[in-house]
Image: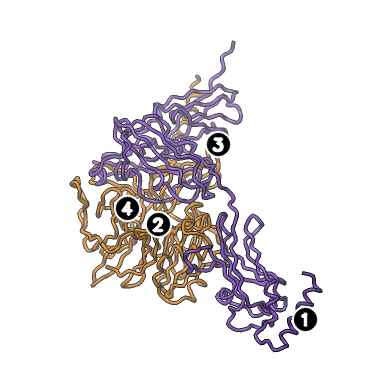
Chain colours: A purple, B orange
Amino acid sequence: MSVLLRAVLLLVCVYAGSLGQGGFNPAQAASSEIWLEFMSEDAGMSMVEVSGLNPTDLAALDRASLSISEWQRVFRVFIADDINSDRLPILGKYSTTNLTIRFTPLYPFDPGQDYDVVFNPAGFVDRKGLSVEWPTKTLVERFHVKTSVTSPSTEIVAVFPSAKELPENQLRFYVFFSAPMGFEGGSAHVSLLASDGSLIPNAFLPLDVALWNNERTRYTMLFDPGRVKTGILPNQQDGRPLQAGKSYTLVIDRNWTDSHGVPLVDSYKRSFQVGPPEKRPIVPSAWNLDVPRADSVDSLKVSFLRSMDYALLHRALVVINSRGESVKGEMFVQKDETEWRFTPLTPWSYSEYRLLIFPVLEDPSGNRVNRSFEVESTALKIDQDQSSRYLSFKPRLAQTP
Amino acid sequence: MRKGGIDMRCRLEQFMTGLIIVLLATGSLAAQTSTADSGVGPTLQYLAPMSFGPDAVLFAADAQEVFIYALDLSEHVVGGVAGTKSVPDIDEKLADLLGTTASNIVLTDLAVYPKTGNTFISLMRGSDPVLLRVDGDADITVVPLDQVSYTRVGLPNPPGETTDMLLKGGRGMPIPNYPSNQVAEYPMNLFGVQTITDLAYVDGRLYAAGLSNEEFASKLRSIAYPFTSVDEGTSVEIWHAPHDQFETRSPIYTFVPYEINGEPNLIASYLCTPLVKFPISSLQPGADVRGETIAEFGSGNRPLDMIVYQKNGQDYLLMSNNRHGVMKIPTQDFGDTENLTGIVPDGATAGVPFETIDALQGVEQLDRLDMDHAIALIRSDTDVLRLEVVDLP
């Protein structure tokens, strides 16, 4: 409406009012001119504004330094709910600008969510210095926030250990995702099935401790150690969740949501056989080292003769040179975690190197270097030898033709 | 090979051997350097577990980044009505206040501030950690973490480039903490990837139980408070020898300080089911720390929270479990319980006698509220969460 027309309308209204039609409020004309504006993150930030208010009124409100509860009597934002009218208003900050009342929620509005906004100008207990132009009519409006991501895109890329046959006393699985996941753990989504398809109850540790890596792209699923370890009550009662000679299927349902709250692309299934428990300690002296050529960037290949723990292989082995410096390069774990390959950034020199093996190294059953996971404690003394081991090697001279 | 050459090599071998032997890594070891700093407005990735310390300090772990914060809540423990009033449908109410749906929030812990009896709740709203207070009027307020002063200690994860390893004879050698160029994802052996599962403050020290998402180990850390940056904190590895038969390393999931016959102990629950005790004095570097078994539980059953209270002049441990409800355990036999030996018969639990409180089902979080009450987060059969003041049984 043009300014002139507005002015004429106002004059007419005032005139009509002065004719004794009590109760008419000239602000009624003005109230139809207030409106709500809703913004969410994709517009830059989350907020709701009431626009079209008289700047003098806004200034008065600003001076009144209202509390949150006073503001909430007049201006409230809720999660939309058609059934339950008892919802609490969203917490946030109330402020005034030159032209608007602004509500900024504590947290951004959620993608895909509906919000109800109520502006009830008559809600102030006292007039707070407001003019007669202050609106009286309540405004209610529902807003929808666009969903940012709808279609599933995150998937499970690998589960370790990767061997086709796993030991009966395995302690854990690592599940790798293609993108960051939400905070929820795996308890509700990972199950172990017997060969007939029946569920093995209580196979995994029933705790929702968040065993994620920093990026939440890897989750560690622990078998219930009470069932795996010998001589513990659950082991006595229910036995190990995996039993040698049988086959099982690991199932991960797709409702495990990623960091956007979207399910996985697909569920995951992997069948495997189970063999006897692995009780041997790790013995580095039995490893096979395929020594690289001097002056080359050939890989050093270390074969363990059986599977080691995938994650710990990335932390427990380091190559140091004769000066005790760590050699920079890239490592690869391959062949069902039976082999570790290391490619240096700069060529090997014809000198003494050592492969340091830190005592944190485990196989999937928790056996460590020179110490099995379960040790008969007849002497009632813990083996304190936690020193590192090393294997030394010297790059070989290339054959001269 | 010339004789001189062989001698040189032998000496080098001996040197290196000496070096390697003293590389005490994740064993029951010595002091580790912790980095301590302070500021206002902690940037947390996660907020749990929590435990009140002296004054209005709330210890809270950021288990994702592996820091332990001492949050100064002196301005935020005041202003509420004393006590805590039950709040039905609390997950819905919290979701409403935070502008989201109940499915987008996960309540991670609760802790009662003893001086006022208000309950503090930590939760994750999506990927944002939130700290709230519930008071005696069931009023829920958000603690503005961006205004909270803190000190914090970073558990070595990841540490600096090298660590000085002591050799025999007192010499040190810097050992690289990172293998090759894999810095961020795989810090070196010594400082495993930990998530903190429980915290408790006793007599000037903060105890923190940690669980690794890689190795099967247990770190119980003891850190002096106020936090300092100089070589504070000891870390011990915990062992478990059930029935004196097979001994393994053992992660601790939850624990509570308790005095037995005048000596400070920790009552702890292992990840593999037993309830154990050990004196705090045993948590010394180099010591063999083995919990003495108090009780064992069947599979699928894990203690979540433990509190100690008194009734009719007797002490009790109240333990919430993920499957079998809440157990009330009299502590009078803790002092002279025979270490559980021998194989436990089928179908039994073993150890000190306990009583299951049938009236308390679905308890997810528990803390002591006052002399006669506990505060609990309870999930009903219909998946509705409530905050409830319960009588201590």
- What kind of element bears circle 4? loop
Q: CA distance from mark 1 to mark 4?
A: 76 Å
Real-space CA distance between mark 2 and mark 1, rounded to the nearest whole angstrom: 72 Å
Residue B258 percent location from the top left of the image = 31, 63
Kind of residue indicated by mark 1: Leu
Residue A6 in the figure: left or right of residue B45: right
Question: Which residue is tagged 3?
Answer: B180
- Look at the numbered disc 1 and give the secondary structure of its residue: helix
Which is in the foreground here, disc 2 or disc 1? 1
Counting from the top left corner in percent of width and height, residue A394 is at: 51, 24
Q: For the residues marked 3 and 4, what is the alpha-carbon distance in whole angstroms?
A: 40 Å
* Residue at point 45%, 57% (across, down): B106
Q: Secondary structure at mark 3?
A: loop
| Label 2 vs label 4, nearer the camera | 4
Could you tell me which chain the residue with mark 1 belongs to?
Answer: A
Nearer-N-terminus badge (2/4): 2
Real-space CA distance between mark 3 and mark 1, rounded to the nearest whole angstrom: 82 Å
For label 4, count other residues whose C-alpha is less than 10 Å away and answer few (under 14), some (14-19) or many (20+).
Answer: many
Looking at the rendered structure, the kind of residue marked 2 is Asp
Q: Which residue is mark 2?
A: B198
Q: Which mark is residue B302?
A: 4
Q: Earlier in the sequence, mark 3 or mark 4?
A: 3
C-alpha distance separating marks 2 and 4: 14 Å
- Residue A11's disc number: 1
x, y (%) of residue B249?
34, 45
Q: Chain of mark 2?
A: B
Q: Which element type, helix, strand or loop, lies under badge 2?
A: strand
User: Residue at the location (40% across, 74% down)?
Assistant: B83
Q: Residue furthest right?
A: A4
